[in-house]
Image (tube, helix red, strand yellow):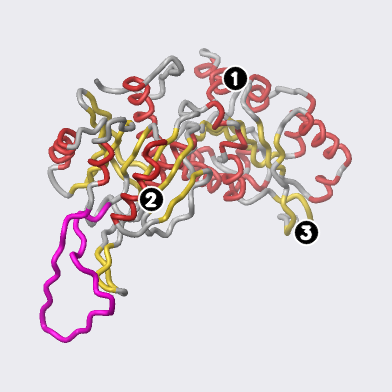
Amino acid sequence: MNIVLGISGGIAAYKTPELVRRLRERGADVQIVMTASAEEFVTPTSLQAVSGRPIRSNLWDKEAEASMSHIELARWADLVLIAPATAELMARLAGGGAPDLLTTLCLATEAPIAIAPAMNRVMWANPAVQANRETLEERGIQILGPDVGSQACGETGAGRMLEPDVIADAVCSPEFAGAVADGILAGRTVLVTAGPTREPIDPVRYITNRSSGKMGYAIASAAHALGARVILISGPVSLPEPRGTDVVYVETAEEMQAATQDRVADADIFIAAAAVSDYRPAETSAQKIKKTRDTITLELVRSPDILASVAALQNAPFTVGFAAETENVRKYALGKLENKNLDMIVANRVGSDCGFDYDDNAAEVLWKGGEKVFDKMPKSELAAGIVDVIAVRFFETRGDEMQPTLSIVSIKE
């Protein structure tokens, strides 16, 4: 989701760097537009650091406005979120005023608008403010909050801006902003596997790996943000369920294979992001193995190859594999792409300093005749980029009369 975050001049503006971080964690791309008063509470420098984008604040910026930048921003946005929204800002919106960049783009956009009011409890209760609130709601502007609690002025009551996590959860819901209906994967089903598997040795021990599931969960969220129905088959992880996805929990490789086989017929795209155990114990002890000998031999047998079995189906979905390697990453990934007859593979290096357990990663997306390289970035952003590439290639190779116009990524062919 492309979010224009408008910041007006209230004390709650100090929370906006955290809000930006929470929005980006959920896969949103955030462009900040500040009012002049907002700059008295939070600096453009700090906001640029967390958003990764230059801050816009001046309607009369000759360089930016030479290309009608406020119109470009208005068209770029999937959602305009104003947090905090002061009483003054609400009055401008209700009256249709456009004295600055933020209110101008609010008039020029066709995207949904949401505001998170923040002000003193007496100001919030003022009849003029409540009349403006009613006017804005009648026009379809979403009002988030305010919360009730202690305020910067020392009083307690309604008027606090909602906490950044609450706002981010609300606006990053595709149902809230209408993103599902308009997403390029709307009407498509994406099946994702994520996390590790656990292969039991006895009732208290098992073989597993270091996968946290973060990348697979981010992939599921990114696919949902593009409008897909997402089914996530998850190994044991300590992560919250991605919003809007159907989650199926499994433990072993055989359970993950069975869950995949049961659901793959409905899938248009299959993304195998799970770190499935390659081997499992040939036998599992029904009781805890006691420490009675100096050595013990554990016989291992091959686990099912879920990815290869899906790719080999007669009517296989668009099939994407992952190659997490400690060395020769590209070589091994290309071999896996060829040997398993995949449509695409995502290759990344893993080790003690990268990959598993980390919140960021880098990757190469490879297919026959093309590639897309992603430098190190948060996994949520990386996942969004990867799913964009998958969507483009899916429609290029499996597209039909309903194929949308695609311009989301630049792909090196």
Q: What's under tag 2, amino acid-wise?
A: Lys
SS category of the residue bearing label 3: strand
Query: Which secondary structure type mostly characterizes the magenta part of the structure?
Result: loop
Q: Which residues are magenta?
A: 276-303
Measured in 3D between alpha carbons, the distance from the residue under mark 1 to the one under mark 3, in whole angstroms, is 39 Å
Q: Nearer the viewer, residue 413 or 152?
A: 413
In the picture, measured across the screen, residue 24 lies left or right of residue 130, that is left
Q: What's under tag 1, amino acid-wise?
A: Trp
Residue at numbered disc 1? 60
In the picture, measured across the screen, residue 392 lies left or right of residue 34, that is left
Residue at numbered disc 2? 214
Circle nearer the viewer, 1 or 3: 3
Q: Nearer the viewer, residue 174 or 27?
A: 174
Q: Nearer the viewer, residue 376 or 390?
A: 390
Look at 75% across and 34% down and name the residue there: 90
> Measured from the top left, where is residue 370 in percent x and y?
23, 24
Q: Earlier in the sequence, mark 3 or mark 2?
A: 3
Q: Earlier in the sequence, mark 1 or mark 3?
A: 1
Q: Are marks 1 and 3 in contact (CB under 8 Å)?
A: no
> Measured from the top left, where is residue 259 in percent x and y?
37, 49
Quarter of the image that includes the C terminus:
top left
